[in-house]
Amino acid sequence: MRDYGTATENMLASLTGVITRHLVWIRPRRRDTGLIEAAGFWNGLDVRQFTVGAEARSYAAAGSLLGLDPIRGEVGLNVRMHTIRFSGIPASVLNLLNVYDLRGAPVEVHRVFFDPVKAVQIGAPVRVIKGWVEEMPLPRAAEGQSAEIEMTVASAARALTRTLALKKSDSAQRRINAADRGREYAATSGAVPVFWGAGKSQNGTPPPTATVPATPTTDDRTGGFSGSGDNRG
């Protein structure tokens, strides 16, 4: 069972009701600079900041334009797909599609509760979805109709289906740690000939190995005659 905190659970147990809102936080990469920038949307009526953990996040108002299918949790390692809908295509969502590369971008969805009488937030936002953008195509609406954008989010179990990279460059390793030189020569590994225990000639081939004369046998010393009689004439 998900822990919403004491204040929220007391409100849920009361008969006064509760208002729920969802916060969508995505961190895509800009196509022009390659930098990762965050964007937030929530189904409220104004731009508002929410504190998630120790981070203050700003969420743009999407109001009724933001729809979220029922979230179903299950035990296991199956990859679940969640659908987030944007009706009417707000300008902020269009900017997201045109400026950023969304595929594979990390996504978090939090649920926040409000008092229906005082309209104040109850407790802290609780995360209900964590995953990555699977797809977010830009549809074309028929004439006289409005379009709807669907963002498909794969659950965190998607990470278990990714295979290991066969190769990794020095630049990729430097982005993790600028001082790490472990893959500095990865691009030329295997292409440069290395000769162990011998000098290298000018044409890049090892020098010929010196031939050691074999020890002469008894037949070599006697000219091939091995008899024991007297050979004098």
Image: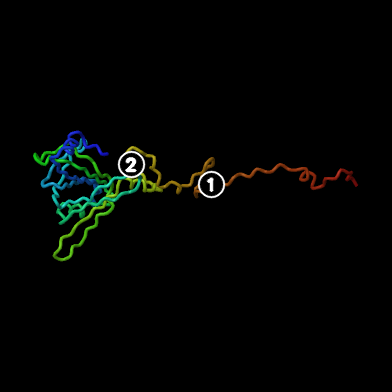
Q: Residue at x 11, y 47 (%)?
A: 45
Residue at image mark 1: 206
Q: Secondary structure at mark 2?
A: helix
| Residue placed most toward the observer, 138 or 9 | 9
Q: Which mark is residue 2?
A: none
Q: Is residue 147 left or right of residue 176?
A: left
- The correct choice, above or below, for 88 with respect to 230 in the image is below
Dot 2 corresponds to which residue?
174
Residue at the image position 14 percent from the left and 43 percent from the top: 19
Farthest residue to the top: give it.
6
In the rendered structure, which amino acid carries the disc numbered 2? Arg
Specify few, some or many for label 2: CA neighbours under 10 Å numbering under 14, 14-19, or 20 or more: some
Foreground mark, 1 or 2?
A: 2
Mark 1: amino acid: Pro
Closer to us: 174 or 225: 174
- Horizontal and vertical percent for residue 178? 32, 39
Residue 114 coordinates in the image, percent (x, y): 14, 40
